[in-house]
Image (cartoon, rainbow, N blue to C red):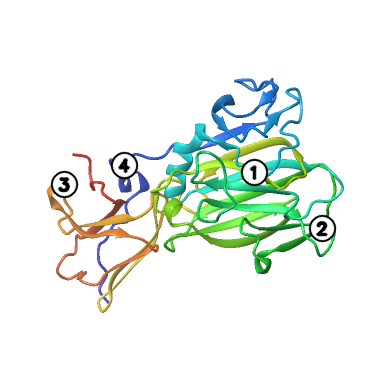
Amino acid sequence: MNHAHVLASASTLLLAGAALAAPVDYTTSFTDSESPAFADGGLDTQNTWVAHPGFSVSEAAGTGLVNHVNANGPVHTGTSADVTSELAAGNTITLTLVFNFVGEFANQNNGAWLLGLSSDSSGMPESSASTLGIATFQNTSNTNFWLSPVGFNNADKYDTGIAFDADFHTLTTTITRSETTNEFDVTVDLDGQSTSYTISNPGLWDGTDTAYAGFRFRGNQGGNIDSFSVISSGEGGGGGTITIDSTSYDSGSGFTINYTSGVGPVDVYRNATGDLDGSNFSLIATGETGGSYVDATADASTDPKAFYLLVEEGMLPVDP
């Protein structure tokens, strides 16, 4: 077996010239102590929130958003650009909602909290085509909290074993853009009980649709929100970098690069000279996904100084 002198470059070089998304970090309890403050009254238009008129901040010094009826939204348009970029980069988006239900009983039709990302800036429709998210509710089969994607398919419903009540509970949804086309890996947790789903949304996956973070109440009962947050991290997607996980060379199969991309599809450049001048880089593959690339034409005996750079699709291998 020959051994090619192939270099796995540091992530700083891998992203030469690339513009990275800004991390998302937004938390609010909808109170007058926020900066900027929330005032009693309708949530719509306050601090870049878009909401149906039924959503109101009724206790500016405490818990708000009470007794709305089957209303779209609210979604926070102030973080939409960052959420969109971070999602397309494959980074993990984590949304958290601290909520309760008002009343004695709420099934999925009478009361459900939805939490996730929507492509609709006017709210959060109950359609998987528009909303990538999770719902929590009381199912009709027992008196526990249940979880499911927003479509409420019976086969996807998960019994948390947590007894339904009017106390405040914490719902956390983590969403990561999968390397599988149009698919997202979604994990939902309610007070420590969790389950996972794979959810398809082509528009949010490829970035053609803008992502808006938010929540929704479904039904005619009611509930309160204590706090909402949305943050992004590099978990599951490379954190805005391209990381070389491993490399191997075999004279029969060529050179294999296993990588993790936090910037979406990558272009592969090959330099057979060992000279970092931009003219010596050749583009050999574009729009690569899947985390593995094989250059079957690699030959260590012919090009002993060859090395590769992986960059965000459309970017140059070195600064001009």
Marks 4 and 1, Cα distance to the nearest angstrom?
36 Å
Answer whether labels 3 and 2 touch (C-beta < 8 Å): no
User: Which residue position is annotated with label 4?
Assistant: 18
Q: Secondary structure at mark 2?
A: strand
Q: Residue at x 59, y 62 (%)?
A: 197
Who comes first in sequence, dot 3 or dot 1?
Answer: 1
Q: Secondary structure at mark 1?
A: strand
User: Which residue position is annotated with label 2?
Assistant: 144
Q: Nearer the viewer, residue 33 or 200?
A: 200
Extreme residue toward the bottom, this view: 252
User: Which residue position is annotated with label 3?
Assistant: 278
Looking at numbered disc 2 in the image, what kind of residue is underneath it?
Answer: Asn
Answer whether labels 1 and 2 touch (C-beta < 8 Å): no
| Of the two numbered discs 4 and 1 in the rendering, the one whose residue sits closer to the viewer | 1
Dot 1, crowdedness within 10 Å: few (<14), some or many (≥20)?
many
Q: Position of residue 92 (x, y in %)?
A: 52, 49
Marks 3 and 2, Cα distance to the nearest angstrom?
62 Å
Along the horizontal axis of the image, is 174 left or right of 86? right
Q: Secondary structure at mark 3?
A: helix
Looking at numbered disc 3 in the image, what kind of residue is underneath it?
Answer: Gly
| Of the two numbered discs 1 and 2 in the rendering, the one whose residue sits closer to the viewer | 1
Q: Residue at x 74, y 49 (%)?
A: 111
Who comes first in sequence, dot 4 or dot 3?
Answer: 4
Q: Residue at x 62, y 61 (%)?
A: 196
User: Which residue position is annotated with label 1?
Assistant: 216
Looking at numbered disc 4 in the image, what kind of residue is underneath it?
Answer: Ala
The answer to whether 155 is drawn above or below residue 150 in the figure is: below
